[in-house]
Image (spheres, rainbow, N blue to C red):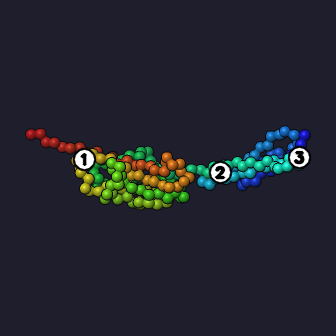
Amino acid sequence: NSRWTASVVGEGASIFPQSGEGAGVVTVTYPENNTEDNKFIDVTIASPEIAEPCTFRITQFGMIPDFYITGETQTTVIWDYSEAVKFNLTAAQSVSWTAAVMMDGVVLEGAVVTPASGTGSAEISVTLPDYLDIMNEGVCQVVLTTDNEKIPEEIRSIEYIVNRTCCTYIPFG
C-alpha cells in the first residue's frame, strides 16, 4: 500500500483527508461562486512511488449576469402613439446595452428611446413618431441588445412589445 498526500489550491477550498495509505476518497469543499468570473480549484495527489503527481482542475463557472425586462408584462397596448411607454430593464453593472425601436424588421425612424444605451439597470422610455398612420394598427418592438459574452447568445437580444390598438368609427347614414 502506497502512502499519498492530497493538496488543494483555490480561494476558500479545503481537502479532507490530506493524506492516506492505499485506495481512498478525498472530499474537496469550496464556497459558492457568486461572481460573474470563473473560479478554479487545483487538486493534487502525490505519492513517493509515483514519478509525477496527479493534478486536476475543478472549474466553478461564474454566474450569468442579469439582463431582462422587469415587470408583469413585456407588452404595452397604447391608443395614442404620442404617449411615452416606460418599462424597466434589469441588467448587471457589467452589462452594457443598446436600444432600438423596430417595426416590420427595420429601425423605426423618428422613434425616441431614452436612454438609447447604457450600462446596468435603467428605466426605458419610448416615444413613437407622430407620422405613424392613426388608422393603422401596428406592433413595434423595442429591441435591447448586449455583446456581453457572459450572457448566453440566445438571450443577448430581448424585446419589449408596443402594440397600438385603434378603433375606427364609421358613421352610418
What's the residue type where badge 2 is placed?
Answer: Asn
Would you call the spot at circle 1 few (<14 residues within 10 Å), some (14-19), or many (20 or more)? few
**Residue 127: x, y in percent?**
33, 56
Q: Quadrant of the C terminus?
A: top left
Earlier in the chain: of badge 2 and badge 3, it is 2
**Residue 42: x, y in percent?**
74, 51
Label 2–label 3 contact, CB within 8 A: no
49 to the left or right of 36 = right
* Residue labelled with disc 2: 33
100 to the left or right of 11 = left
- Spatial CA distance of label 2 from label 3 is 36 Å
Q: Nearer the viewer, residue 12 or 173?
A: 12
Corner quadrant of residue 98: bottom left
- Disc 3, SS: loop
Mark 2 or 3: in front is 3
**Residue 22: x, y in percent?**
87, 40
Mark 1 or 3: in front is 3
Which residue is located at x 46 percent, y 60 percent?
118
User: Where 128 falls versus 20 (above or below)?
Assistant: below
What's the residue type where badge 3 is placed?
Answer: Glu
Can residue 47 be seen at all in this image of the molecule? Answer: no
Can residue 17 be seen at all in this image of the molecule? Answer: yes
- Spatial CA distance of label 2 from label 1 is 51 Å
Earlier in the chain: of badge 2 and badge 1, it is 2
Which residue is located at x 53 percent, y 48 percent?
152
Which residue is located at x 41 percent, y 56 percent?
99
82 to the left or right of 47 = left
What's the residue type where badge 1 is placed?
Answer: Asn
Per the rendering, the mark at residue 136 is 1
Would you call the spot at circle 3 few (<14 residues within 10 Å), some (14-19), or many (20 or more)? few
Per the rendering, the mark at residue 49 is 3
As drawn, the residue found furthest toward the left would be 173
